């Protein structure tokens, strides 16, 4: 178990969303929400009941339009939440329901629901894995586990679990991958079985990752400084992998950090980074809204917070030494 270490970043925050044209949400007299462009032209009519803290005139951020709520007069798909449109007003998909809202992006992909099945869409709204499985977990280290013939079982008022069915593992192309008979140290364990390391890099990408490898020791000590239990060097080992490459509306490499078991450190944003297309400028992702902050500014704040934590918890077993 770890103690919560709150990071308050006071440096300027920069959005990395690359959008075409200014769009903003608007509310009708009956508080339904739609989207208009800068000239006042309606892109999506006001027909959504929104449950997030959305104000009239708030900008549309990101490559698509998300309505975080229900559509007037329409019954939502089972296990779905919200509606996603492109910036021209074309409906794209309904996100999977997760954590009382629309599913988050994980390794550049978000789960969607169609006809009761689960698939995946990218940040530009493209369906990259068709909805054909009864359930799928988010992607982690290049793979996602899925099941067919399974069902939900309610465990209490707030939580459900998946029971039954046949389980498998897919890659980012949606292909089912079989476990290895003779795994190596480079391969990844999923539910007691091993699968091929999914990451391959060219020289430019290796140089991007080298930036983080050179700071691995410091980054590891920063991340684990507030863990209760004393960890070995092996248990504090980190892996850095490129999970997204530059594409339309997204001129960055995204680098995620994984623990020694190749598990994502955090489902949302912590210790996730962006690198400019030329490989020269580095950022940290600051919050769940996917804002970016210059890496050096982020690192200074992380160091400051780690040192303050140690002053307040002198018995913390995993020490951070700034050198």
Image (cartoon, helix red, strand yellow):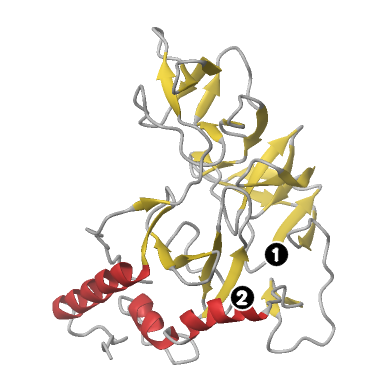
Q: Which residue is mark 1?
A: 143
Residue 34 makes an appearance in the image: yes
Residue 139: x, y in percent? 64, 59
Q: How many marks?
A: 2
Q: Quadrant of residue 39?
A: top left
Identify which residue, 233 or 24, lies in the foreground. 24
Give me the residue at 28% from left, 91% from top. Answer: 323
Say which of marks 1 and 2 sits in front.
2
Quadrant of the image occupied by residue 282: bottom left
Residue 303 horizontal side relative to residue 15, left or right: left
Q: Position of residue 194 (x, y in %)?
A: 74, 78
Q: Quadrant of residue 309?
A: bottom left
Residue at 48 percent across and 47 percent down: it is 17
Mark 1 or 2, nearer chain start: 1
Q: Residue at x 69, y 60 (%)?
A: 144
Of the 4 image quadrants, the one containing the N terminus is bottom left
Q: Which residue is mark 2?
A: 205
Residue sitting nearer the eye, 44 or 176: 44
> Vertically, is 268 above or below 218?
above
SS at circle 2:
helix
Relative to 284, does residue 98 appear above or below in the rendering?
above
Q: CA distance from mark 1 to mark 2?
A: 20 Å
Residue at disc 1, secondary structure: loop
Up the image or down, 224 lies above or below 256; here it is: below
């Amino acid at each position: 178990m770890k103690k919560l270490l709150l990071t308050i970043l006071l440096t300027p925050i920069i959005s990395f969303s690359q959008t075409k044209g200014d769009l903003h949400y608007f509310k009708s007299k009956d508080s339904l929400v739609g989207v208009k462009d800068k000239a006042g032209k309606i892109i999506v009519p006001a027909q959504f009941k929104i449950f997030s803290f959305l104000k009239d005139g708030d900008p549309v951020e990101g490559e698509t339009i998300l309505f975080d709520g229900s559509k007037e007069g329409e019954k939502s798909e089972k296990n779905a939440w919200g509606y996603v449109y492109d910036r021209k007003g074309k409906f794209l998909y309904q996100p999977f329901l997760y954590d009382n809202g629309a599913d988050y992006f994980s390794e550049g992909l978000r789960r969607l629901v169609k006809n009761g099945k689960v698939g995946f869409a990218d940040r530009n709204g493209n369906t990259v894995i068709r909805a054909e499985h009864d359930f799928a977990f988010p992607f982690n280290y290049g793979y996602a586990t899925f099941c067919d013939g399974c069902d939900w079982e309610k465990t209490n008022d707030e939580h459900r679990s998946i029971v039954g069915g046949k389980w498998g593992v897919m890659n980012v192309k949606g292909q089912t991958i079989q476990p290895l008979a003779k795994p190596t140290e480079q391969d990844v364990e999923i539910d007691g079985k091993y699968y091929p390391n999914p990451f391959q890099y060219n020289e430019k990408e290796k140089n991007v990752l080298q930036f983080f490898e050179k700071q691995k020791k410091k980054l590891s000590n920063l991340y684990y400084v507030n863990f209760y239990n004393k960890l070995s060097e092996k248990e504090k080992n980190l892996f850095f992998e490129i999970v997204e490459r530059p594409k339309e509306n997204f001129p960055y490499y995204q680098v995620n950090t994984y623990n020694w078991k190749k598990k994502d450190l955090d489902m949302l944003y912590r210790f996730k980074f962006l690198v400019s297309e030329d490989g020269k400028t580095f950022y940290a992702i600051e919050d769940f809204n996917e804002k970016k902050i210059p890496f050096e500014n982020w690192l200074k704040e992380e160091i400051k917070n780690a040192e303050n934590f140690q002053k307040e918890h002198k018995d913390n077993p995993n020490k951070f030494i700034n050198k």
